[in-house]
Image: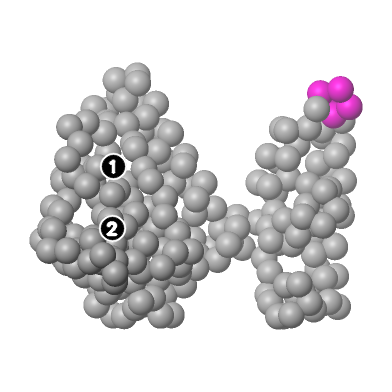
Amino acid sequence: MLVGPPNAGKTCVLQVLADTLCLLKEKGVLEEEAVTYRTVNPKAITMGQLFGEFDPITHEWSDGIVAIIFREFAFSKSPNRKWVVFDGPVDTLWIESMNTVLDDNKKLCLMSGEIIQMSNSMSLIFEVMDLSQASPATVSRCGMIYMEATALGWEPKVQSWLKMLPEQWAGENRPCIYALCRWIIPSATGFVRKNCKVRIFRIKIIIMVDGSLLSSVEFYYGVL
């Protein structure tokens, strides 16, 4: 489980790790295997769409997204590492259905009676903001990596933005632009934290890290 607030770099860490392992495989270094992964947001769909369900009228079984991914990876002959990434909140509404997967048995048991055994090359990865709704049984079955957004800061976002600027006008001006950002951004974010209340669509007051504040500037004004 990768645990941390938004803009902590959880998704980028996974993507960089996957790309690195693929590059090592391509170059034949350290006998590593490439990575194939599928990402699912478990809270964006219903439980039936996630694990599968019987049609109440025809009584026919319809596979869910997790069942399809598990079957694809479990019966694949490829030696690649296979990651099933759950990018969304962990709560008892869906994670309890995966207790048999998180156990040493590593089996997905569906309501249809089908049991899918995870292969040795498969891994489950969870991207979550917090574990406030997760049960102790779920937490004890997983390894934890906590990522702190304040440790990342705003500079990586600005540096990546500078690399995407068109050469026609950025060119030699990048050091100057970066110096201006180092001068303005800390003062601006400090002012916002001291004097402003940050809301999402004028509804809920939230605490935002510096990276999220820059993202809001990008969203509203197209600056970054």
The mark closer to the camera, 2 or 1, is 2
Instruction: Compare marks 2 and 1 and give the one earlier in the sequence.
Output: 2
- The residue most toward the front is 57
Residue at 68% of width from left, 58% of height from top? 211
Q: Is residue 174 left or right of residue 133?
A: right
Q: Nearer the viewer, residue 86 or 178?
A: 86
Q: Residues within 10 Å of mark 2 (few under 14, many from 20)?
A: some
Residue type at mark 2?
A: Ser
Residue type at mark 1?
A: Lys
Mark carried by residue 62: 2
Residue at 29% of width from left, 69% of height from top? 57
What range of the chain is rendered magenta? 167-171
SS of the residue under disc 2: strand
Residue at 33% of width from left, 50% of height from top? 84
Could you tell me what secondary structure mostly forms the magenta stretch?
Answer: loop
Answer whether residue 37 is magenta in the image: no
Q: Which residue is mark 1?
A: 82
Residue 74, position as x, y percentages in the image: 19, 44
Q: Quadrant of residue 77?
A: top left
Q: How is the image coloured?
A: one colour
Residue at 46% of width from left, 72% of height from top? 130
Q: Residues within 10 Å of mark 1 (few under 14, many from 20)?
A: many
Spatial CA span between label 2 and label 1: 24 Å
Residue 87, position as x, y percentages in the image: 45, 58
Q: Is residue 127 left or right of residue 162?
A: left
Q: Is residue 58 visible?
A: yes
